[in-house]
Amino acid sequence: MKDRPEALISAEEISRRVAEMGREITQDFEGKQLTLVGVLKGAFVFMADLIRHISLPLHCDFLRVNSYDAHGQSSTIRLEFDLTQPIEGQHVLLIEDILDTGKTLHFILSHLRTKNPASLTVCCLLDKGLNPDLAKEVRYVGFKAPRTYLVGYGLDLAGEYRELPYVARVDLKKP
Ligand code: IMP
Ligand code: MG
């Protein structure tokens, strides 16, 4: 069995920050109903925790894009599956795990805008800060992240490590 990588952002830090983000979202959208759209698979752990800190009526839906191959290398972005319900006229909060080059987010935002939501707001757990222009589109960021490959709390490397309760750095060069 592989060693568990060391925590970069601890479970406690994540839990505190996620609760804070939930409170902020609750205040900002007071009196509104939200539709949360999670980007699978990476955002599912974050989204599951976050919704339990949002005190508003909300619906959840998911989409899946595939922009990374099994080795963590960037390739073409494809929509693997789409939302199950229309979002026209709804306040949509997009939940992403991590913002790297921003290409995935750009693709998803363009796609969702064609569905005419009343508003479209982005909430991301981690931001590597590589794309300041796109970062302006992201209202909620959990943590600034280093520009290295991260795993845990939903994030994977070739399907592994999603179950770690914390975020860790992995060395892609190691076998
Ligand atoms: P971008 O299109 O370069 O911004 O990449 C964003 C997507 O790639 C995210 O939604 C993640 O699924 C994945 N990704 C980017 N960086 C990492 C990382 O460090 N660990 C795990 N997944 C990542
Ligand atoms: Mg993702």
Image: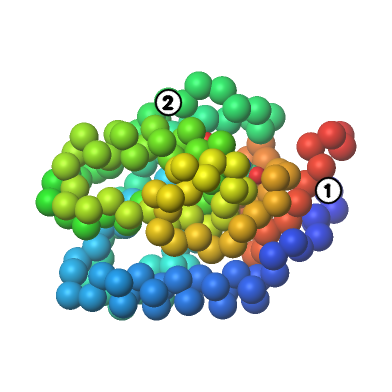
Q: In this picture, is 13 found above or below 169?
A: below
Name which residue lies at 59% across and 62% down.
Answer: 143
Name which residue lies at 70% across and 45% down.
Answer: 147
Amino acid identity at mark 2:
Arg
Where disc 2 sits, the SS reads strand
How far apart are the two marked residues, 2 and 1, measured between alpha carbons? 31 Å
Percent x, y of residue 15 = 57, 74
Name which residue lies at 65% across and 76% down.
Answer: 12
Percent x, y of residue 149 = 71, 43
Q: Which tag is nearer the camera, tag 2 or tag 1?
A: 2
Which mark is first along the chain, 1 or 2? 1
- Quadrant where the C terminus sits is top right
Q: Which mark is residue 78?
A: 2
The image quadrant of residue 166 is bottom right
Percent x, y of residue 22 = 41, 73
Name which residue lies at 57% across and 52% down.
Answer: 127
